[in-house]
Image (cartoon, grey):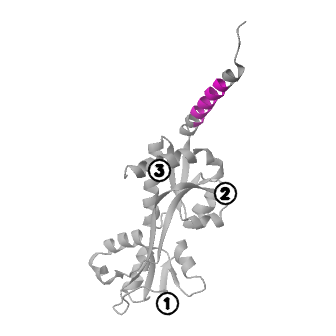
Amino acid sequence: MLKINYKSIGLTLLACLTILLGTSLHTFAADRTYILSYSPGTLFHQLVRDRIKKVYERAGLEVECIALPHNRSLVSANEGTVDGDVGRVPSVEEKYPNLLRVNVKLMDLNGAVYTARTDIGQYSADLLKTRKTAYVLGVRWPEKKMEGLKAVKVRDYHSLFEMLLQNRVDIALATEASARSTIEKLGQRAERIHRLDPLVLTAPIYHYLNKKNAGIIPLLEKTLEEMNSEGE
């Protein structure tokens, strides 16, 4: 009598089903366009946007990035109005519980102090207490640094560095990438402005998705790991 190995058949069917399910899920993910938000008010977030677009392209996923105010971008991603935010520091997880981290670092955020004064040569935390300080409204890390302290809040980086040049403030807290771009645009006028050492902050930036999109996180993490290993 022919002996049928039901256990073996069952395992084979399960393996086939897993492969088919994985293929269908990937196909489904690739068939839709993911909407990600970013803040247009900072060059740094635009750099993060450009990097995550390359990751989605490499992963075979369609993506569209839309500009929203800095905080609205996070709120919209948390509420599920958009599929995710292009990239943030991990501290956002405390306030936005519906955001899931793609747990491979995109890049680093470097925060620094800038000044046009000749009598300030090095950064120390005491500067924030004793010197007139400004930062761009909505950029989260300077807000946290200046909690409980007085500060001037401006609408964009151009206004921030104009205040330094006009001696209306002593120091400015700025994300390095955004500051570099603004100083380049100001040209010779900005020669007086210099960055203080050491950096105020270095923090990893991660891509965040609304929890409804948890299914594509492993694919994005795998893609990022591959790109990082290739030095891209």
- Circle 1 sits on which residue? 126
- Crowd tier of the residue under label 2, counting other residues whose Cα lies within 10 Å: few below 14, some 14–19, many 20 or above: some
Task: Report the residue at 48% width, 83% height from top.
Answer: 134
Within the image, what quadrant is residue 13 found in?
top right
Task: Report the residue at 33% width, 91% height from top.
Answer: 118
- Circle 2 sits on which residue? 98
Asked if the residue at tag 1 contacts the one at tag 3, i.e. Cβ–Cβ closer than 8 Å, the answer is: no
Does the magenta run of residues contain 182? no
In the image, what residue type sits under mark 1?
Asp
Residue 56 located left or right of residue 161? right
Q: Which residues are magenta?
A: 11-25
Image depth: mark 2 or mark 3 in front? 3
As measured in the structure, the alpha-carbon distance from the residue carrying label 2 to the one carrying label 3 is 22 Å
The mark nearer the N terminus, 3 or 1, is 1
As measured in the structure, the alpha-carbon distance from the residue carrying label 3 to the one carrying label 1 is 39 Å
Element at label 1: helix
- Circle 3 sits on which residue? 224
Residue 202 located left or right of residue 210? left
As measured in the structure, the alpha-carbon distance from the residue carrying label 2 to the one carrying label 1 is 37 Å
Element at label 2: loop
In the image, what residue type sits under mark 3?
Leu
The mark nearer the N terminus, 2 or 1, is 2
The mark nearer the N terminus, 2 or 3, is 2
